[in-house]
């Protein structure tokens, strides 16, 4: 976590960067006190208290009456819902995602790359998919998900971002070196889709295909997720369904660009 003193953005405001750094502190912890926030940001407790008080006044964070500590506020939820609803890619994908869930019987994701991570814009769950997911988060390292592999195979910038960030290991099957990473992406390009089996969580498997722009650069990925046992059954059919859905969304987004 960068300290407030490091938040020197050209043409920006350090106070805004400090507030964003503070919000990032809550990415893992549900509640934090003033002293903990000050320590993480590398600022005085009085500065941390002013930041917290200011954000609380706008309901961006809130203070627990029971503990006196701070947590994310519901106004962030409202803004997040608005941000998702206004993403054109997600809007155009929803019907396709619902059809894919119905046809495959698996949990369906629409994902994009954010820095070195996979960010899930949408998740349509099924019971069988939820049973093997130990922890659902919207963000995971690109090298651990089939979506991340599918995106990076057709986006050199995302591929380089993951290399620069390294390869944290989650299970014995997780990709853990640049050599493995490059070999896996070459495989994805050869076959046109990506898989992940026990690389993020044991027993969790997924299949993904890239959503490509007009220049062949991936803008997103569509994936289906279930158990490793499911992946071995009807594998070819599941791959065809995912690839077909990703290609349809690619065409829809290309049509939008032409209309614009």
Image: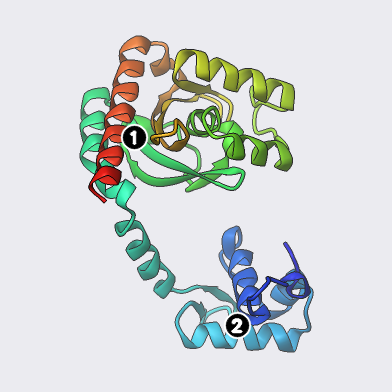
Q: Report x, y in % for residue 108.
A: 34, 34
Q: Is residue 205 above or below residue 254?
A: above
- x, y percent for residue 8: 73, 72
Left or right? Give the position of 11 relative to 99. right
Left of 93 or right of it: where is 26? right
Residue that carries the numbered disc 1 in the rendered image: 108
> What is the secondary structure assignment of the residue under circle 1?
strand
Pick the residue in front: 179 or 33: 179
Quadrant of the snapshot with the N terminus: bottom right
CA gap between label 2 and label 1 equals 37 Å
Q: Is residue 107 visible?
A: yes
Structural crowding at the residue carrying mark 2, measured as other residues with C-alpha within 10 Å and reported as few (<14), some (14–19) or many (≥20): many
The front one of 36 and 238 is 238
Residue positioned 74% across, 77% down in the render: 38
Closer to us: 178 or 252: 252
Q: Which mark is residue 181?
A: none
- Mark sitting earlier along the chain (2/1): 2
Residue at x 52% of width, y 47% of height: 139
Coloring scheme used: rainbow
Q: Are marks 2 and 1 in contact (CB under 8 Å)?
A: no
Question: What element does badge 2 sit on?
Answer: helix
Q: How many marks?
A: 2
Task: Using the rendered view, name the quadrant where residue 68 is placed.
Answer: bottom right
- Horizontally, residue 169 falls left or right of residue 111, namely right
Residue 84, image x, y percentages: 35, 57
- Give the residue displayed 58% in from the left and 26% down from the top: 199
The residue under label 2 is 52
Please provide percent x and percent y for residue 161: 65, 41
């Amino acid at each position: 976590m960068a300290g407030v003193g490091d938040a020197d953005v050209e043409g920006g405001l350090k106070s805004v960067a400090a507030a964003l750094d503070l919000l990032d502190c809550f990415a893992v912890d549900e509640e934090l006190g003033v002293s903990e926030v000050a320590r993480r940001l590398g600022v005085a407790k009085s500065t941390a208290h002013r930041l917290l008080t200011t954000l609380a006044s706008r309901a961006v964070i809130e203070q627990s009456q029971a503990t006196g500590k701070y947590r994310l506020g519901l106004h962030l939820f409202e803004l997040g819902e608005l941000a998702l609803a206004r993403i054109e890619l997600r809007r155009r994908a929803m019907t396709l995602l619902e059809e894919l869930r119905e046809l495959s019987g698996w949990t369906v994701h629409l994902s994009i790359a954010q820095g070195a991570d996979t960010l899930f814009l949408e998740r349509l769950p099924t019971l069988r998919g939820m049973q093997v997911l130990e922890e659902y988060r919207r963000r995971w390292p690109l090298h651990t998900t089939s979506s991340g592999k599918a995106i990076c195979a057709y986006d050199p910038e995302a591929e380089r971002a993951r290399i620069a960030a390294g390869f944290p290991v989650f299970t014995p099957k997780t990709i853990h070196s640049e050599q493995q990473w490059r070999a896996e992406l070459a495989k994805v390009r050869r076959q046109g889709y990506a898989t992940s089996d026990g690389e993020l969580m044991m027993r969790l498997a997924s299949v993904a295909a890239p959503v490509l722009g007009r220049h062949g650069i991936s803008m997103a990925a569509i994936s289906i997720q279930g158990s490793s046992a499911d992946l071995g059954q009807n594998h070819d059919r599941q791959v065809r369904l995912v690839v077909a859905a990703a290609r349809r969304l690619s065409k829809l987004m290309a049509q939008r660009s032409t209309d614009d």
